[in-house]
Amino acid sequence: MPAWSEIVDRQTGLLSPAQNRALRDTRVLMLGVGGMGMNAAANLVRMGFQRFTLIDCDIVDGTTANRTPFAFEDTLGLQKVEATRRYLLAVNPACSVTIHPDMRFGLESDPIFMERLLAEHDLVSWAMDGMAGRLYFTRIAHRVGSLRAGGIPAVESWALPYHHCVQTVPNRADTPSWEACFGLPSAALPMEVIDAGVVRDTQLAFFWTLACTPRLWEDFDPELVERWVGLRMPNRSLGSAVVGCGALIASELLANALQVAGLPLPNLAIHEAPWMAIQDLRRQVSYELNYATRRLRWRHPITLELHEQDAP
């Protein structure tokens, strides 16, 4: 098996020895290790990260094969956290991997346990479905992160049709919460009054916000769009898009890990909410979109000059 020094050998020079050590020592909490989460973990361990906590209650089945590197005949039926743990240790046996296969997120989840878990980590990868769990986690993350000077950056991504999207929610005292970034109706409500109806209304509002991504739905059947935004369609994914989102999460976590360690890499951007980085796979273009102000910005690929305009 390769030693950690061999794993990071090819990136030494691109990263300093101190930066490589910072990645090794960063504690990453991974909420969700399905398509995007597992691909993020696979990238992170090959960058030299080796301290992981994995949370996911789902199992590996045949449909997982279109988007994850751990879906093999001998992993079918395993908990995803266990399959991911085996994968990480196969790459680097020195990894420290803690798993929580039975933990679920929802309105009745234990906030004390999550507060303690967040306090023990430096970064979060958020790659789980479900608005109830998202509201529960993001509120606790912002509360706990606000007590820490650098916050607790949480990186999340979406594999929209033919689009990769990624952003960092800083969870610092001087930054808005995730709900406030998106202007969601639940933002003004205390957690104790949020019920299934509020969760559904918030999910609809959030999906409609994502659906306003420029040119997202061109060439798609309008009925399909309405079903997706109206929450009447099961999850669908293009495998390559999900894999690409996993790589974006890993790159964003890399930038945040170095920032938290006080060793930032010049020109490695962090896309802080409400700004989100978007890659349009069909048109081969990349830009940033501010979901709060509906502003677009992008850099010229040669001059790096920054351009900005209202979104169409």
Image (cartoon, rainbow, N blue to C red):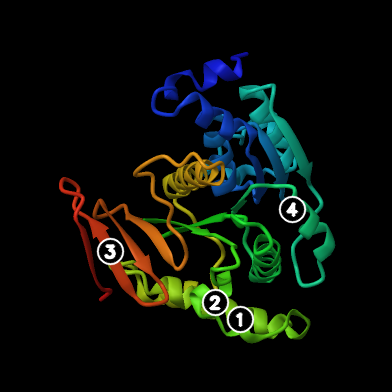
Is label 2 in a helix, a strand or a loop? helix
Q: Position of residue 268 (x, y in %)?
A: 38, 44
Quarter of the rendering containing residue 76: top right
Mark 3 falls on what kind of element?
Answer: strand
Per the image, the residue denoted by label 4 is 119
Q: Disc 4 and disc 2: Cα gap in Å?
A: 22 Å
Which residue is depicted at the point 33% across and 68% down? 220
Marks 3/4 in contact by CB < 8 Å: the verdict is no
Q: Name the kind of residue labelled 2 in the image.
A: Ala
Mark 2 or 3, nearer chain start: 2
Q: Is residue 307 left or right of residue 292?
A: left
Q: Amino acid at mark 1?
A: Ala
- The residue singled out by tag 3 in the image is 297
Mark 4 residue element: helix
Chain-order first, disc 1 or disc 4 = 4
Task: Read off the residue under disc 2.
Answer: 180
Q: CA distance from mark 3 to mark 4?
A: 34 Å
In this view, the mark in front (3 or 4): 4
Q: Amino acid at mark 4?
A: Ala
